[in-house]
Amino acid sequence: MSFKKLHIVLLSYHDSNGGAGIAAGRLKVALENAGHQVDYLVREKTTDSKATKWGNRIVSWLKFIAERLFFLGFEKDKSIRFLFNPGIFGSDISKHPLIQQADIVHLHWVNFGFLSIDDITSLTRLNKPVFWTLHDMWAFTGGCHHSGSCDHFQQNCGNCKFLKHPGSKDLSNRLWKHKKTGFAAKNLHIITCSDWLGNRARQSSILGDHDIKTIPNAIDTDFFAPRTTHLNLDSNKKYVLFVAMRVNAPAKGFHLLKEALQFLDPNTTELLIVGGEMTEELPLKSHSFGQVTDPSKMRDIYVAADVFVTPSLEENLPNTIMEAMACGTACVGFKVGGIPEMIEHQKTGYVAKAFDPADLADGIKWCLSNEKAGIKSRERAVHLYDQSTVAQQHLSYYAQA
């Protein structure tokens, strides 16, 4: 199917720090390869990507601090500090020349003082389609990024578990009301990376009446592909890989992986860790790569691994699973979020019972003993997540606006 050439502007807080920024950057490349003009505006830029940094750094930092200070008086405790964003500080970007010129405005993750609820509302008041790829639940809750077992977002938020003084008219309820009014425009079109998140958005009182379509993130399956690696690892060993921006972040579930490792043979199996140094004693010998920002090195690590494990407690559609699959590495994860949509149980990998270390270990063992799972993972990644496929899905949705 052919489409007229479009000018698309993507917006995300960061160009590379976090899955949403990486996903938006990859979408830019995919849409450009399909023949369209794409600009990518970000608040923070730390790589040589083709993103354009927008806004004064000092002002941006002050707005981030202001939002955190504002929430300080409401938060239950510091453990939830970044699990809830009020979204009341930001900058009006609606008059930016690129936004004014764009045929399509496409939001990704825009918190941390980049765009406020009012700033997003201002974009929907422009006479043009606004698309929003959701990477978590923030757009349709009273402030949390993931609600867990709470279903208040289906009716009206309030009595929020993240707040020091929950009540029917608490901060989450006021923010919920603000979003329900501000995000009501019919030219706001919602994209979710997984059916799991899409179904939650459809159940929500804020976005339930909107057009919602599931489109996965894109990946360059020519780059992320099986190849010869040059890592200095023992070819007689089997390697289990874990990747996280912060290894000890509770939501990433490393504590559950640690329990699962006790069921594996330490004489034949070792652990690869990306995301930080481990100081605690582990059941298996480990190799820590620290923070890896070079995509080529990350690809080599995926290829070197025999199985990739995602023990996260909450996930949408992790880029890491897509990357590992494309590199021909079988994956294991819990039955949470969008993970079961990615991994075909006992075909391309293993979907373990939620938060069950013993079953997670069974999944690792299954992958280590089923070499064809990696081949099937690669085939599935190319079929579902290749850049050209995902670009066409976006363009078809844009054309409906």
Image (cartoon, helix red, strand yellow):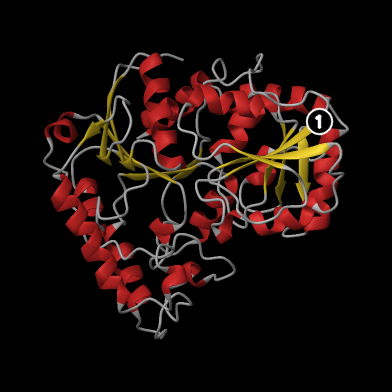
Query: Left or right: 117 with respect to 62?
Result: right
Question: Looking at the image, which residue is at 31% across and 66% down?
Answer: 86
The quadrant the C terminus occupies is: top left
Q: Is residue 34 visible?
A: no
Residue 141, relative to residue 96: is it above or below? below
Dot 1: few (<14), some (14–19), or many (≥20) neighbours within 10 Å?
Answer: few
Question: Looking at the image, which residue is at 55% across and 28% down?
Answer: 298
Query: Left or right: 250 with respect to 259?
Result: left
**Circle 1 — which element?**
loop
Where is residue 371 drawn, in percent x and y? 83, 26
As shown in the figure, which amino acid type bears the numbered disc 1?
A: Lys
Q: Nearer the viewer, residue 44 or 166?
A: 44
Q: Nearer the viewer, residue 45 or 31?
A: 45
Q: Is residue 311 visible?
A: yes
Question: Looking at the image, which residue is at 69% across and 45% down?
Answer: 340
Where is residue 271 drawn, in percent x and y? 71, 41
For the image, the number of numbered tags is 1
- Label 1 belongs to which residue? 237
Where is residue 362 drawn, in percent x and y? 85, 47
